[in-house]
Image (cartoon, helix red, strand yellow):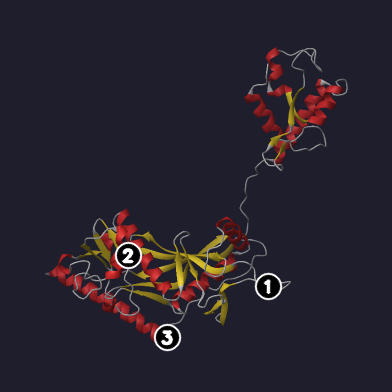
């Protein structure tokens, strides 16, 4: 009669998958040679049949011969040893050997309660989030003859003469309606050829984001706006991997960007480069591109933020995509060496690049705008800390100059004018 599966599992788990013979310690599952292989053997202390080793030992119930209490897990070599020497390895000896081994396994895997340290360290935890201090107060909507699959046709009909050089014109097409931040009721708006201004109307941002579909649409509009913001500075969006990456300014030439370091020094760094072999100085058959995942998120009813997730993009020559089978391994290897301070330095670089070293950057939508602050959201915590981990990070706060202050006042001024217009409409 075979040993029941339940009893086999009990023995294997209690033995920890290790041979129970003293000082053997052989692991009984071989995982090195491709498919995992079980190399252990279940040995009876009192043989399954009376003719076997130690088989004449009396048991209270004959069925106990195949119970876990009568089975010991051994490697093939020591299984042969105990069966060839039944007078040396008697029932009493094997029961004690089994008990000792299973006790050692239980002690080795025992979970000890975590005791709180007596001394806690006060530290500041920096997130990778930038606060959105102002959103457009309205989303405009109007019926049109285009569907979501006809985005390219709509782009060709946008009147870019109706917008300033810094203005973004994100839009969404849903259910034969166009949604945008531009005032679609204005006859001079950039979408006037697509949506009849007489049919358009505003929806307050609060009402627009009151359900999950509205929130998704708001995120879509804002993400499209950040794509335009990055595109003006030759940072493109990779739709396959949902990340933004720098592209060369000149074919086959490394690209560098100036920025302000976390310590406030002017510096520059490679953002697109061909790594070279140290031994020969020869270029390797791939290029690295600095990249990041950028996306807007709603944290509460009236709280939004922009997240920054540092990444890497890899190409063969600065343009052609690298073999996808090897990209993940290379990127994972790079990120594995990027500890907290290095990771936050990458986040800092992106916030500096996006804002051009200013306290904030503004996404311009004509009469409306979105304002994103560059100070990272952070919180103070009391925790045990990590020994010898004393590398600090400066959550640098940029100072306003006349230009950045003027931009802010202009953006806030338009915001206040929109609020006054809404108030007047409600009064009427």
Q: Position of residue 276 (x, y in %)?
A: 66, 72
Q: Position of residue 95 (x, y in %)?
A: 78, 25
Residue 63 visible in the snapshot: yes
Quarter location, residue 411: bottom left
Q: Residue furthest left?
A: 428
Q: Position of residue 98 (x, y in %)?
A: 76, 28
| Front in this rendered view, residue 36 or 4 | 36
* Crowdedness near tag 2: few (<14), some (14–19) or many (≥20) residues, C-alpha within 10 Å: few
* Residue in the image at 28% along x and 66% along y: 154
Q: Quadrant of the N terminus?
A: top right
Q: Is residue 214 above or below residue 403?
A: above
Residue 61 visible in the snapshot: no
First of labels 1, 3 by sequence position: 1
How many angstroms separate mark 1 from mark 3 (CA)? 45 Å
Q: Nearer the viewer, mark 1 or mark 3?
A: 1
Q: Secondary structure at mark 3?
A: loop
Asked if the residues shown at circle 1 and circle 3 are in contact, with their CB atoms under 8 angstroms apart, the answer is no
Residue highlighted by disc 2: 152
Residue highlighted by disc 3: 401
How many angstroms separate mark 1 from mark 2 (CA)? 42 Å
Asked if the residues shown at circle 3 and circle 2 are in contact, with their CB atoms under 8 angstroms apart, the answer is no
Residue highlighted by disc 1: 282
């Amino acid at each position: 009669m075979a040993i029941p599966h339940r009893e086999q599992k009990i023995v294997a788990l209690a033995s920890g998958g290790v041979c129970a013979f003293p000082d053997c310690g052989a692991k009984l599952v071989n995982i090195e040679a491709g498919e995992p292989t079980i190399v252990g053997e279940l040995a009876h202390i009192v043989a399954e049949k009376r003719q076997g080793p130690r088989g004449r030992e009396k048991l209270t119930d004959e069925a106990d011969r195949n119970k876990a209490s009568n089975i010991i897990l051994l490697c093939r070599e020591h299984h042969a040893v105990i069966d060839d020497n039944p007078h040396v390895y008697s029932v009493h000896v094997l029961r004690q050997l089994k008990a000792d081994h299973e006790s050692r396994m239980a002690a080795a895997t025992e979970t000890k309660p975590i005791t709180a340290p007596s001394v806690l360290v006060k530290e500041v935890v920096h997130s990778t989030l930038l606060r959105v201090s102002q959103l457009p107060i309205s989303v405009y909507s109007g019926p049109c003859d285009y569907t979501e699959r006809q985005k390219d046709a709509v782009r060709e009909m946008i009147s870019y003469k109706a917008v300033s050089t810094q203005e973004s014109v994100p839009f969404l097409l849903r259910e034969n309606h166009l949604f945008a931040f531009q005032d679609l009721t204005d006859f001079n708006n950039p979408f006037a050829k697509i949506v009849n201004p007489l049919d358009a109307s505003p929806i307050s941002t609060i009402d627009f984001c009151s359900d999950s579909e509205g929130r998704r649409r708001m995120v879509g509009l804002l993400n499209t706006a950040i794509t335009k913001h990055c595109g003006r500075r030759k940072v493109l969006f990779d739709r396959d991997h949902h990340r933004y990456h720098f592209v060369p300014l000149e074919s086959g030439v490394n690209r560098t960007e100036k920025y302000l370091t976390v310590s406030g020094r002017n510096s520059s760094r490679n953002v697109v480069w061909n790594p070279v072999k140290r031994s020969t100085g020869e270029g390797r058959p791939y290029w690295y591109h600095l990249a990041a995942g950028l996306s807007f998120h709603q944290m509460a009813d009236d709280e939004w933020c922009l997240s920054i997730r540092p990444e890497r993009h890899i190409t063969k020559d600065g343009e052609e995509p690298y073999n996808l089978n090897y990209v993940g391994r290379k990127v994972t290897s790079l990120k594995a060496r990027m500890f907290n301070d290095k990771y936050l330095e990458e986040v800092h670089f992106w916030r500096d690049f996006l804002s051009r070293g200013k306290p904030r950057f503004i996404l311009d939508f004509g009469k409306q705008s979105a304002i994103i602050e560059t100070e990272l959201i952070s919180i103070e915590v009391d925790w045990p800390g990590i020994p010898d981990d004393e590398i600090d990070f400066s959550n640098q706060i940029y100072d306003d100059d006349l230009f950045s202050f003027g931009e802010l006042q202009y953006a806030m001024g338009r915001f206040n004018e929109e609020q006054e217009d809404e108030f007047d409409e409600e009064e009427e």
